[in-house]
Image: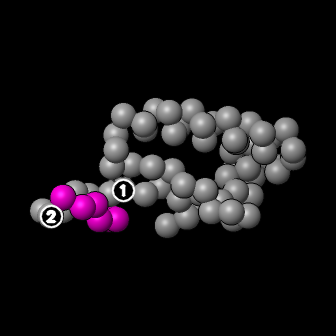
Amino acid sequence: MSVEREVLLKEVWGDDSYSNSMALNVQITYLRRALKSDSTLSIEAIIRKGYVLKHYCPVKNGNWSLK
């Protein structure tokens, strides 16, 4: 499931102004740093759309599968 950037901006900051857009970039950076120690989670950008939180699970053959 993905979340559109404009939705995040309007729900969290009330509008999608440039300064709020930069604040969202900073918060996403902080979240990515916080999740860095967990290799099963990542926040990925969908260009010109928004973000998606991905959860990877190890499978028996040593590869990773998206859950």
Left or right position of 8 against 67: right
In the image, the segment drawn in magenta is 62-67
Residue type highlighted by circle 2: Asn
The residue where tag 2 is placed is 61
Instruction: Place residue 50 in its image quadrant.
Output: bottom right
Image point 51% across, 50% down: which residue?
Answer: 43
Q: In the image, residue 10 lies at what x, y percent?
A: 75, 52
Image point 70% across, 42% down: which residue?
Answer: 24
Q: CA distance from mark 1 to mark 2?
A: 18 Å
Looking at the image, residue 59 lies above or below residue 39? below
Q: Residue 14 shows which numbered tag?
A: none
The residue where tag 1 is placed is 55
Q: Secondary structure beneath disc 2? A: loop
Q: Secondary structure beneath disc 1? A: strand
**Along the viewing direction, whichever of 64 and 7 lies nearer the viewer:** 64
The earlier-in-sequence mark between 1 and 2 is: 1
